[in-house]
């Protein structure tokens, strides 16, 4: 039977592949139009799985699930806004380390005390996330400058994405997959409202539409394994392993798009492998 660490790594892999597919789709149409399809389709998938799996629908499952969905949706929105307005080389690693640090800090406040080896693995994993997600940008291309708005958007996105881990971790263990359904329902409402306000309320067609369905499948798998990993392990350990998802994205970009991998990203992947061994050991 797969353990909590295996579930966390499976979730990270699914999230990483989903981000890669989303990036490919967003090169053809606006990212919001892709999410406009993938989010409600993922909601339908999670609803079907929740019905099959059963579980109690409680107030805690509804409220915490919705808070998790909203925090995840807002985090992604603010992250894209920060990358659009500021230097990706700063935004990406800063958001990643804040995202990974929030659940670790909350776990400490709640009394979690991982062993010495696991704690060292957490610190190593945080460094790996920064190195893997660090983008230097293209030479000769003028990049947006760093200002107070970009910094606030970046930190806010990291906090929001980190809180998603916390909210789902606190959902009742007997609620089954219902919290994920309420999370996706809240995110769907937010996406539709934002799409309507920005005049992007139309689904993509052709290849982007097919990729959006694939993203929904990957997102569903990622969230299900994430919930189980959080329920079966310490918040600080599971969330850090899941936060290694950029490794899968970078690997696919190098393998399929022939993008050039930088030495710092190679170093980050080596650190990630060492961190996984320390945490799971």
Image (cartoon, rainbow, N blue to C red):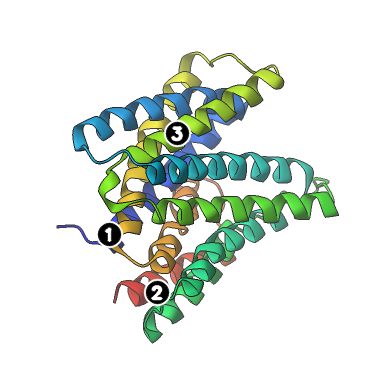
Label 1 vs label 2: CA separation?
A: 15 Å
As drawn, 267 above or below 12: below
Earlier in the chain: of badge 1 and badge 2, it is 1
User: Which label is found at residue 226?
Assistant: none
- Look at the numbered discs 3 and 1 and tell me whether their residues touch, using CB distance below 8 Å: no
- What residue sits 40% from the left and 74% below the top? 274
**Percent of width and height locating residue 146:** 82, 54
As drawn, 36 above or below 180: above
Along the viewing direction, whichever of 257 and 250 lies nearer the viewer: 250
As drawn, 263 above or below 179: below
Does dot 1 land on a helix, a strand or a loop?
Answer: helix
Looking at the rendering, which quadrant does residue 178 occupy?
Answer: top left
**Percent of width and height locating residue 11:** 36, 50
The crowding category of the residue bearing disc 1, from other C-alpha atoms within 10 Å (few below 14, some 14 to 19, many at least 20), is some
- What residue sits 42% from the left and 35% below the top? 182
> Which residue in the protein does label 3 denote?
184
Does residue 161 show up? yes
Along the viewing direction, whichever of 68 and 136 lies nearer the viewer: 68
Q: Quadrant of the C terminus?
A: bottom left
- What residue sits 61% from the left and 16% below the top? 201
> Which residue in the protein does label 2 denote?
274
> Which residue in the protein does label 1 denote?
6
Along the viewing direction, whichever of 170 and 247 lies nearer the viewer: 170
Of tags 3 and 1, which is closer to the observer?
3
The crowding category of the residue bearing disc 2, from other C-alpha atoms within 10 Å (few below 14, some 14 to 19, many at least 20), is some
Does residue 136 show up? no
Q: Quadrant of the N terminus?
A: bottom left
């Amino acid at each position: 039977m797969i353990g909590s660490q295996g579930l966390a790594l499976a979730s990270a892999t699914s999230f990483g592949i989903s981000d890669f597919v989303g990036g490919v789709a967003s090169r053809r149409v606006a990212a919001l139009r892709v999410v406009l399809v993938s989010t409600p389709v993922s909601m339908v998938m999670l609803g079907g799985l929740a019905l099959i799996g059963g579980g109690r629908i409680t107030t805690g499952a509804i409220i915490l699930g919705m808070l998790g969905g909203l925090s995840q949706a807002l985090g992604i929105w603010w992250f894209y806004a920060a990358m659009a307005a500021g230097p990706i080389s700063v935004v990406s690693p800063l958001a990643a380390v804040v995202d990974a640090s929030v659940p670790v800090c909350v776990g400490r406040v709640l009394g979690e005390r991982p062993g010495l080896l696991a704690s060292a693995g957490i610190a190593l994993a945080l460094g790996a996330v920064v190195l893997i997600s660090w983008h230097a940008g293209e030479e000769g291309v003028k990049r947006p400058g760093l200002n107070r708005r970009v910094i606030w958007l970046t930190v806010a996105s990291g906090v929001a994405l980190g809180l998603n881990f916390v909210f789902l971790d606190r959902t009742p263990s007997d609620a089954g997959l219902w919290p994920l359904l309420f999370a996706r329902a809240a995110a769907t409402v937010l996406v539709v409202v934002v799409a309507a306000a920005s005049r992007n309320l139309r689904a993509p067609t052709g290849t982007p539409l097919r990729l959006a369905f694939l993203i929904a499948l990957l997102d569903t798998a990622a969230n299900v394994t994430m919930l189980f990993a959080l329920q079966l392990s310490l918040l600080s350990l599971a969330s850090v392993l899941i936060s290694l998802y950029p490794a899968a994205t970078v690997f696919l970009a190098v393998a399929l798009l022939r993008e050039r991998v930088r030495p710092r990203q190679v170093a980050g992947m080596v650190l990630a492998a060492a961190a996984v061994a320390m945490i799971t050991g």
